């Protein structure tokens, strides 16, 4: 994937990573949301902490809910956030 991705972090994910957004250019082997999560979790300790319990992380690609198998395209905006609860 030659073009960069915009990555957004919300709530406790933002706190653990230390930024609310970043632009990354992952290797071409990163083609899905699941690949991206593995790539990010291996960047450093802060990212590893954010993605430690992956069952508690939700994702949206271009503001649409996405699952781990969602294909990523160059220039996508990928947001990670905790499960949303209503009340």
Image (tube, rainbow, N blue to C red):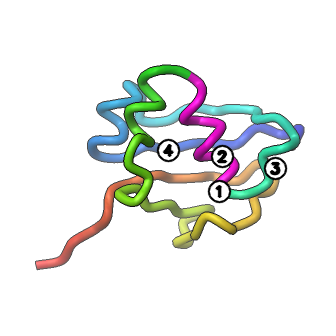
Q: Residues within 10 Å of mark 1 (few under 14, many from 20)?
A: many
Say which of marks 2 and 4 sits in front.
2
Q: Secondary structure at mark 2?
A: helix
- Which disc is residue 53 wearing? none
Q: Which residue range is magenta in the image?
A: 34-43
Image quadrant where one finds the N terminus: top right
Disc sitting over residue 74 in the figure: 3
Residue that label 4 marks: 8
> Residue 38 appears at what percent x and percent y?
62, 42
Asked whether the residues under the numbered discs 3 and 4 touch, taking CB atoms below 8 Å apart as contact, a structural biologist would say no
Name the residue located 43 percent from the left edge and 61 percent from the top edge: 58
Q: Report how far apart the C-alphas of labels 2 and 1 lie in the structure.
A: 5 Å
Distance of label 3 from label 4 (alpha carbons): 15 Å
Q: Is residue 25 left or right of residue 16?
A: right
Q: CA distance from mark 2 to mark 4?
A: 13 Å
The residue that disc 1 covers is 33
């Amino acid at each position: 994937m030659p073009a960069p991705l915009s990555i957004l972090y919300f709530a406790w994910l933002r706190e653990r990573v230390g930024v609310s957004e970043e632009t990354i250019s992952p290797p071409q082997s990163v083609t899905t949301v699941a690949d991206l999560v593995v790539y990010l979790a291996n960047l450093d300790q802060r990212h590893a902490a954010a993605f430690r319990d992956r069952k508690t992380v939700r994702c949206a690609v271009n503001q649409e809910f996405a699952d781990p198998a969602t294909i990523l395209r160059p220039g996508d905006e990928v947001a990670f956030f905790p499960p949303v609860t209503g009340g």
